[in-house]
Amino acid sequence: MPTYREALRAATERLRASGVDTARLDAEVLLCHVAGIDRAELYRRLPEPVDFPLAAFWHLVERRAQGEPVAYLTGYREFYGLDFVVTPATLIPRPETEFLVAWATARLRERTDRARCVDVGTGCGAIVIAIAATLGPDHPALLVGSDRSLAALRVARLNRERLAPGRVHLVCGEFLAWCRGPLDLVVANLPYLRPEQWHPGLAYEPPEALFAPDDGFGLYAQLLPQVSERLRPGGGFAFEIDPSQAERAVAAARRFFPDAAVTLLPDLAGRPRYVTVEREDETTGRATRRRRSLG
């Protein structure tokens, strides 16, 4: 049998030859997955012969070489320090979306009441479950993840039971049509890509979780008035966009929330990626916007 090092080297070469940018990392993740070990143990075993049949590993390597995402091959994706179950029924969570978790968590931590927070288009539940896990079981916030896809909600249910049992309510519904409000916080990472932004790296993810009409902004155009009707004074709303939509997103937010502080924020690459809306609190006459580090 080859050693772990030899198997890793061969897999890396195969993936690199197929054009995978993260060939070495992907090979390590797949080898760890099949062997049932973590990366620290993999490095310890590098000089040792592989002690399991390699057919399953090479099968996954070949599927990765054809473009299938590692997350779908292993069934998991790390997000906000948690391992989420993912399937082809859901979008694979991206690191940039972690901002929404940090934004919501920072505000909920300041509250001791039963604040109502909804994650619209929850998918696998990554945002709302990460919020719940970060706040812990004793925080009184009411946390809800909604999605119109029953298949996605089945995955979210698995993640809720694994990572935040008893902390998150899941609802099948279109945007916020199921909810009367009032709400304290709303977060959303809805599909926002234009069809022409498709590339082979997206081929395995559900199109309905990626693309939206009207230059990619159509779903937010439907959601914004619903949030405006349900967000209480002093409440906040944050959503992720494509950088090309920045000007339109800010203008739309200001139109539906004339009484709020609307802010456009960059991702770690410096691209405009998030719009936050913080409605004025009637009791203080001030917007609830705060300047703080989310790192």
Image (cartoon, rainbow, N blue to C red):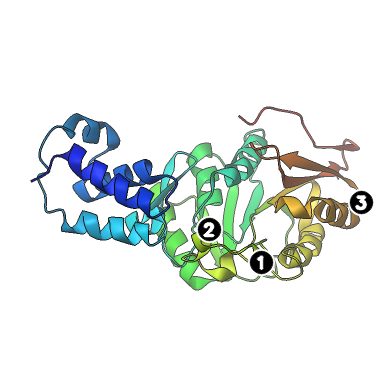
**SS label for mark 3:** loop
x and y, in percent, of residue 71 in the image:
40, 54
The C terminus is located in which quarter? top right
x and y, in percent, of residue 81 in the image:
45, 38
Gap between marks 1 and 2 measured at Cα: 35 Å
In this orientation, does residue 161 appear? no
**SS label for mark 1:** helix
Is 182 or 206 nearer to us in this picture?
206
Gap between marks 3 and 2 measured at Cα: 31 Å
| Residue visible at 20% across and 37% down in the picture | 5
Mark 3 lies on residue = 258
**SS label for mark 2:** strand
Between marks 3 and 2 in the image, the one whose residue lies nearer the viewer = 3
Q: Is residue 12 left or right of residue 197?
A: left
The amino acid type, in three-letter code, at marker 1 is: Glu
In the rendered image, the vertical position of residue 246 relative to residue 215, given as above or below = above
Q: Residues within 10 Å of mark 2 (few under 14, many from 20)?
A: some
Is 21 or 195 nearer to us in this picture?
21
Mark 1 lies on residue = 196
The circle on residue 238 is none
User: If you read the primary sequence from the N terminus, does the residue marked by circle 3 or circle 2 appear first?
Assistant: 2
The amino acid type, in three-letter code, at marker 2 is: His
| Residue visible at 56% across and 69% down in the picture | 207
Mark 2 lies on residue = 169
| Residue visible at 49% across and 50% down in the picture | 167
